[in-house]
Image (cartoon, rainbow, N blue to C red):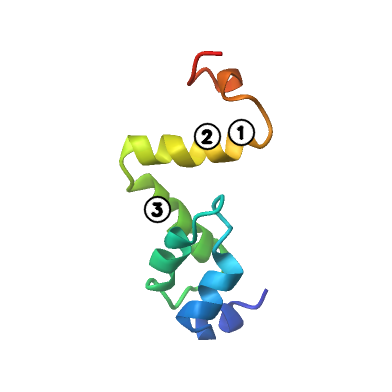
Amino acid sequence: MDIEKVNSMDFGEFVDVFGNVIERCPLIAAAVWSKRPFSGLGDLEKHFFAFIDGLPLSETEHISSCIAGRFFPLSHWGRLTP
């Protein structure tokens, strides 16, 4: 996707397009939208990761469990008991 197109998206369009980048969590896309303009797709990605890195551990574990749970049982990751 062209970064100029991404930078020109209004809030609703941005959340519609990127709202599921992090497992069913459009709130993250909404927060990242406010960081525009992005210098490139790597910069956009950096802002998604920075938002997640700034969350409390309990929230990052929740996001991780949503992603991991799609592929492995949570016990596989050693975070939860079987």
Spatial CA distance of label 3 from label 2 is 19 Å
Mark earlier in primary sequence (3, 2): 3
Q: Which residue is mark 2?
A: 65
Q: Residue at x 50, y 14 (%)?
A: 81
Q: Is residue 1 left or right of residue 66?
A: right
**10 Å crowding of disc 3: few (<14), some (14-19), many (20+):** few
Foreground of the two, 27 or 45: 27
User: At label 1, which amino acid type do we have?
Assistant: Gly
**Mark 2 surroundings: few (<14), some (14-19) or many (≥20) residues within 10 A:** many
The residue most toward the front is 82
- In whole angstroms, how far apart are the C-alphas of marks 3 and 1? 23 Å
Q: Amino acid at mark 2?
A: Ser
Q: Could you say which quadrant of the image residue 3 lies in? A: bottom right
Q: Position of residue 70 (x, y in %)?
A: 66, 37
For label 1, the crowd category at 10 Å Cα-Cα, with few meaning under 14, some 14 to 19 and many 20 or more, is some
Residue at disc 1, secondary structure: helix
Is mark 1 in CB contact (under 8 Å) with mark 2?
Answer: yes
Image vertical order of residue 27 relative to residue 82, above or below: below
Residue farthest top in this picture:
82
Q: Nearer the viewer, mark 3 or mark 1?
A: 1
Residue pointed to by mark 1? 69
Q: How many marks?
A: 3
Secondary structure state at the residue bearing disc 3: helix
Which residue position is annotated with label 3?
Answer: 50
Residue at left offset 49%, top offset 61% = 26
Quadrant of the drawing holding the N terminus = bottom right
Name the residue rendered at 69%, 33% in the picture: 71
